[in-house]
Image (spheres, helix red, strand yellow):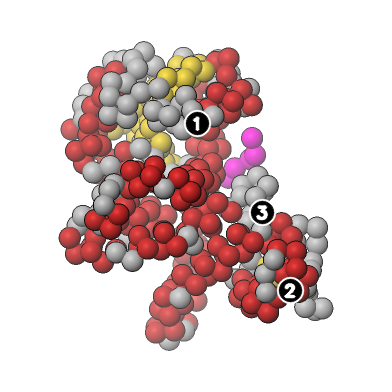
Amino acid sequence: MPELPPPSVVRGLEKQRAELQKQVRDMAPPPFSLLELIMGSMVTQALRVTAELRVAEALADGPLGAEEIAGRVGANADALGRVLRLLASQGVFSTGEDGTYALTPLGDALRADHPMTMRDIALLMGHPIHWEDWGSFLETVVTGEPSLPKLRGMSAFEYLESNPEYGAVFINGMGNMSATETVPVVAAYDFSRFGTVLDFCGGQGGLLAGILQQAPGTRGVLYDPRVEGNGAAGFLREQGVADRCTTVAGDLFGPVPAGADAYVLKHIVHDWPEAEALRILRNVRAAIKPDGRLLLVEMVVPEQGDQPHSGKLVDLWLMLLVGGRERTATQYADLLSRAGFRLERVVETAAAVSIVEAVPA
């Protein structure tokens, strides 16, 4: 497992970066600084095109000129050169005196084979359907209701199932983000004190595998409605934890298997409006031992202040798509109390997510 800085160090660096960015913005006339924010969507599209064409892979062996890159990826040399020029100004590529382009550490993370690749999330963020979703954001803010069901005629989850091509892009992008959180979560919390950990709707089991690797004496239960057909069994074997892990298929809103010492819900509660979130938590409450632990892995939004936080962005996306939300610690304490739990503490990680730890009340 790679070494990670303590969360306090990460938070300090984030604060310094935010202050520096504010100072830079304050040095320019306000309309010009605002214009940079407004035009940020163009950078997103340039990154999506670069990821789609696999430009980073073409540069993996060393610098190349725009014409040679275009030949390798099947693009117009002039058009691609202009995209590279923009992204070089953003630090994604660097330019040599001979006019060639080379990968920087940022650009390297666009490679599909990078250990923490960002390629899938770049493909999702620039996807035409994703942009069409955001085109109806005004209605969400005016009405306070998710606009995607009205736009698509079905819920976000139904739309992803009925459009498998985009569904794959969406799931891969979300998995891309989720995978970057596994190591920080496992590094921030001692799971070895639990005999059995149940990962609720844990997909293929990425987080559960990380937990079991950290805690060799712990057993796992992967509970997910699609566990029988999503490749989880093969993934868990590859990770070397299949002999300590049981897979169980079940309903998201149905009864939860009892008997685990800890129930982990990663990015589950934030996906749903209040009523559904409470239903999920109350089902876990019915299954949990009196001395069990509930661990919600979520982006906990700061109670106050104007510091940047990824949860503030994702919160708007949830509001648009599904009517969910990111919460502050106070809001989690209230939600958990109504579901029969008591908030014990919030454990920060080196990523944007925290571990919200609760016990049965």
Q: Is residue 70 visible?
A: yes
Q: Is residue 321 left or right of residue 40?
A: left
Q: Give the answer, above or below, for where 328 lies relative to 312.
A: above
Residue occupied by mark 3: 111
| Mark 2 residue element | helix
**Is residue 2 one of those drawn in magenta?**
yes
The residue drawn where x is 67% and y is 74% is: 76
Q: What's the residue type where badge 2 is placed?
A: Ala
Badge 3 crowding class, 10 Å Cα cut-off, few under 14, some 14 to 19, many 20 or more, is many
Residue occupied by mark 2: 66
In the image, 62 versus 150, the foreground residue is 150
In the image, 3 versus 149, the foreground residue is 149
Choose top left, top right, bottom left or bottom right for residue 297. top left
In the image, 213 versus 307, the foreground residue is 213
Q: What's the residue type where badge 3 is placed?
A: Arg
The percent position of residue 305, horizontal first and vertical second, equals 32, 60
Mark 2 vs mark 3: which is more N-terminal?
2
| Mark 3 residue element | loop
Q: Are marks 1 and 2 in contact (CB under 8 Å)?
A: no
The percent position of residue 30, horizontal first and vertical second, equals 39, 83
Mark 1 vs mark 2: which is more N-terminal?
2
Badge 1 crowding class, 10 Å Cα cut-off, few under 14, some 14 to 19, many 20 or more, is few
Q: Are marks 2 and 3 in contact (CB under 8 Å)?
A: no
Residue occupied by mark 1: 230
Q: What's the residue type where badge 1 is placed?
A: Asn
Magenta segment, which residues?
Answer: 1-8
Task: State the predominant SS element of the stretch in magenta.
Answer: loop
The residue drawn where x is 62% and y is 64% is: 50
Give residue 141's mark: none
Judge depth for marks 2 and 3 and give the one in front: 2
Q: Give the answer, above or below, for where 165 lies relative to 263.
A: below
